[in-house]
Amino acid sequence: LAAFRVTPQPGVPLEEAGAAVAAESSTGTWTTVWTDGLTSLDRYKGRCYHIEPVPGEESQYICYVAYPLDLFEKGSVTNMFTSIVGNVFGFKALRALRLEDLRIPAAYAKTFQGPPHGIQVERDKLNKYGRPLLGCTIKPKLGLSAKNYGRACYECLRGGLDFTKDDE
């Protein structure tokens, strides 16, 4: 179950906006393709089952969307988040959209195996204890030479970060 804060574009009916969020975050696509006729997507569709206004916020609503578990790959947090929030935020019928809450059923959560080891192993590798670990992603993600990428990493680590991440 997901709760989205939705601000529809002027002229877009609220029910249409809610249904569009449910479709776009599950089985929807921006165009019809010939392969749509090869299967029935009904069992995978998200459904907007309730819409309520946000108190004190004009033109903002909470759209509640339910997703069938068959939509998601078992044990894959990445698949679940990519499905729910991957493409929906660029939807033109909405002026603004934000995921406010997400409820994961226990049956699905039990399929997550968890990380191969805990935070203690990471702290031991970095020899960093007693505080949060801090990292960053080097930008731009494309176009830096190896030398300049290394320089950016060096400056980040020299400045106090614990790690850097390659975005590609």
Image (tube, rainbow, N blue to C red):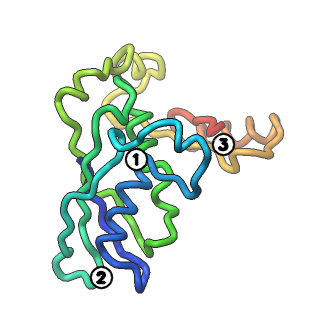
Q: Residue shown at 44%/75% (left/top)?
A: 95
Earlier in the chain: of badge 1 and badge 2, it is: 1
Mark-to-mark CA distance, 2 and 3: 45 Å
Mark-to-mark CA distance, 1 and 3: 41 Å
CB atoms at circles 2 and 3 under 8 Å apart?
no
Q: 10 Å neighbourhood of mark 3: few (<14), some, or many (≥20)?
A: few
Q: Residue shown at 53%/44% (left/top)?
A: 36
Identify the residue position indicated by label 2 in the image: 59
Q: Does 168 appear above or below 1? A: above
* Rendered location of residue 35, percent (x, y): 58, 40
Snapshot quadrant of residue 99: bottom left
Identify the residue position indicated by label 3 in the image: 155
* Rendered location of residue 25, percent (x, y): 41, 51
Mark-to-mark CA distance, 1 and 2: 24 Å
Q: Does 122 appear above or below 58? A: above
CB atoms at circles 1 and 2 under 8 Å apart?
no
| Circle number at residue 26 | 1
